[in-house]
Image (tube, rainbow, N blue to C red):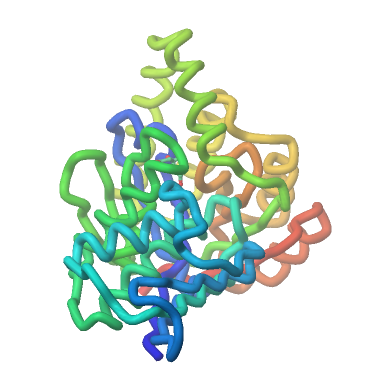
């Protein structure tokens, strides 16, 4: 049996504007992971792949899935990339501890875990950039215009400064930095959120371009604050980013409730993370206060919380 895994992700600053060419910062969330296991089957036709993905209630053969099903697409893409034309029947088992449709990169992590497990199983290694590029093809199924930040941070498993169309710049965070993540329990549908922003941008391009520019400035200042180890400044920039995301129309009353609860219990800053309109929020906190802020989020309705150290 061959196994591999991939982490979840958090967008620290810059979601949505990153689709329109502005910079963004993302960090891996290694505490939650997707895993893929590959095993050769004694029986079954050559080329057949049995897929077991109990988290999404899927137990079937690959050939029964439409070619644009995310799991089918990634298996086909890996075979093509590795030039595997025929192989003994396989079982592919996929599990994930990343909440689904919540802005934490669950779909991306599943793709990267499958790429890693299959390439390991077939003995053809793929580098990080190749893993990221294959997962990007699946991202396109979820929404037409992915920036590529999600597959990049998940494949690199390192903080990245990302600008669409440019080589990603991985970096490390030198200061102990603690984030508390809180899930509204509302599904965050990336394609709906990204589609809504696109319609709004088409209807009022000047206003949205100005919002994206302001987010880009927040990201640049955020990168400088991280370099300087200035967490108070980073927290305030997260608040500013949230105000701009709210103006863009991608927040929700549930997200606002959790963000307010985090701030009023001592967070240095808080914002939604990912596509929004539900899903998760993040709060930058003092490590000593993480437990009480998690409790405050739960009291305010969070369905799931997690404390993540993203520093050195
Ligand atoms: C989703 O994690 C981030 C978005 O900016 C979409 C993208 O960058 O493709 C909302």
117 sits to left or right of 291: left
* Image coordinates for residue 147, horizontal then vertical, percent: 33, 40
Residue 61, placed above or below residue 249: below
Front position in the image: 129 or 40:
40
Residue, x 55% and y 33% (percent of image)?
193
Left or right: 156, with 58 as reference point: left
**Residue 175 placement: quadrant:** bottom left
Find residue 283 and report its horizontal and vertical position in percent.
58, 55
- Along the viewing direction, whichever of 283 and 99 lies nearer the viewer: 99
Q: Residue at x 33, y 29 (%)?
A: 20
Q: Position of residue 132 (x, y in %)?
A: 28, 58
Q: Does 73 appear above or below 238? A: below
Q: Nearer the viewer, residue 84 or 225?
A: 84
Position of 83 with respect to 48 (left or right) is left
Q: How many dots with numbers?
A: 0
Q: Quadrant of the N terminus?
A: bottom left
Which quadrant holds the C terminus? Answer: bottom left
Which of these two is toward me, 231 or 259? 259
Residue 234 appearing in the image: no
Q: Is residue 71 above or below residue 292?
A: above
**Residue at left offset 33%, top offset 33%:** 216
**Residue at screen point 19% across, 68% down:** 82
Where is residue 277? Give x, y as percent: 63, 37
Q: Is residue 116 visible?
A: yes
- Ligand 1: which quarter? top left
């Amino acid at each position: 049996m061959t196994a591999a895994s991939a982490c979840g992700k958090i967008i620290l600053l810059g979601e949505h504007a990153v689709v329109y060419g502005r910079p963004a910062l993302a960090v891996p969330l290694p505490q939650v992971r997707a895993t893929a296991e590959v095993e050769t089957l004694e029986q079954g036709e050559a080329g057949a792949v049995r897929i077991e993905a109990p988290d999404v209630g899927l137990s079937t053969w690959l050939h029964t899935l439409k070619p644009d099903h995310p799991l089918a697409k990634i298996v086909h893409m890996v075979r093509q990339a590795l030039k595997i034309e025929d192989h003994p029947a396989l079982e592919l088992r996929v599990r994930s501890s990343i909440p689904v449709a919540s802005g934490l990169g669950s779909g991306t992590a599943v793709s990267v875990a499958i790429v890693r497990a299959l390439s390991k199983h077939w003995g053809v290694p793929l580098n990080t950039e190749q893993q990221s590029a294959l997962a990007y093809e699946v991202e396109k199924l979820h929404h037409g215009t992915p920036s590529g930040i999600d597959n990049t941070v998940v494949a690199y498993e390192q903080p990245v400064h990302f600008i669409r169309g440019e080589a990603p710049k991985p970096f490390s965070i030198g200061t102990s930095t603690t984030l508390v993540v809180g899930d509204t329990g509302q599904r965050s549908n990336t394609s709906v959120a990204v589609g809504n922003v696109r319609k709004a941008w088409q209807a009022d391009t000047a206003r949205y371009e100005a919002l994206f520019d302001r987010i880009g400035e927040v990201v640049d200042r955020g990168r400088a604050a991280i370099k300087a180890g200035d967490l108070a400044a980073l927290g305030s920039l997260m608040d500013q980013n949230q105000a701009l995301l709210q103006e863009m129309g991608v927040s929700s009353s549930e997200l606002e409730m959790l963000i307010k609860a985090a701030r009023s219990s001592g967070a240095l800053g808080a914002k939604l993370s990912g596509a929004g309109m539900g899903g998760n929020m993040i709060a930058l906190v003092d490590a000593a206060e993480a437990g009480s802020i998690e409790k405050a989020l739960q009291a305010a309705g969070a369905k799931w919380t997690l404390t993540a150290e993203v520093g050195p």
